[in-house]
Each structure stands twice: as C-alpha cells, then as structure tokens.
Image (spheres, grey):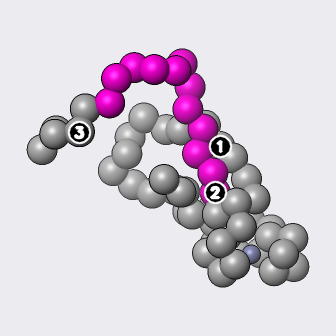
Amino acid sequence: MNKNKVGFQMAQKKVALACSVCGSRNYTVPKKTDRATRLEVKKYCKYCDQHTIHRETM
Ligand SMILES: [Zn+2]
C-alpha cells in the first residue's frame, strides 16, 4: 500500500518526541527513513519531573 507518496522536500526532517504522560514535546530528533516503527525513548521530562516514555509525534 503506497497511496500517500511524499515527495522529496527537505534533506532531513525532524520529528518531535512527546512525553507520553503530559504530552509535552521536549525533544526533537532527526527523522529516520524507516517508518514502520515508532520511536520510543525513555527521557527526562521537566514537566513531570521524572523519566517518562517519549514517543515520536506526527
Ligand atoms: Zn511529561
């Protein structure tokens, strides 16, 4: 299934990593080419004041 073909626009895209608890976008990382998996990283959230799972948005 390849109905939504995206053109080659920018050299490198960035995605935000949002805290899974409060939803704040605390980090940005370079977009990976493989879109099959969603990035999940445990990072410090200053709003939650603890390490939480941060997920790739968009
Ligand atoms: Zn948070």
Residue where numbered disc 2 is placed = 17
Between the C-alphas of marks 3 and 1, the distance is 23 Å
- Crowding around mark 1 (Cα neighbors within 10 Å: few <14, some 14 to 19, many 20+) is few
- N-terminal of the two: label 2 or label 1? 2
**Which quadrant of the frame does ligand 1 lie within?**
bottom right
Mark 2: secondary structure = strand
Circle 2: residue type: Leu
Rendered image quadrant of residue 22? bottom right
Residue 18 vs 35, above or below: the answer is below
Tell me if 20 is positioned left or right of 5 in this view: right
Q: Is residue 42 visible?
A: no
Q: Nearer the viewer, residue 23 or 49?
A: 23
- N-terminal of the two: label 3 or label 1? 3
Residue ID at (49%, 38%): 32
Residue 4, numbered circle: 3
Residue ID at (58%, 45%): 15
Residue 29, numbered circle: 1
Mark 1: secondary structure = strand
- N-terminal of the two: label 3 or label 2? 3
Rendered image quadrant of residue 41? bottom right
Tell me if 7 is positioned left or right of 25 in this view: left
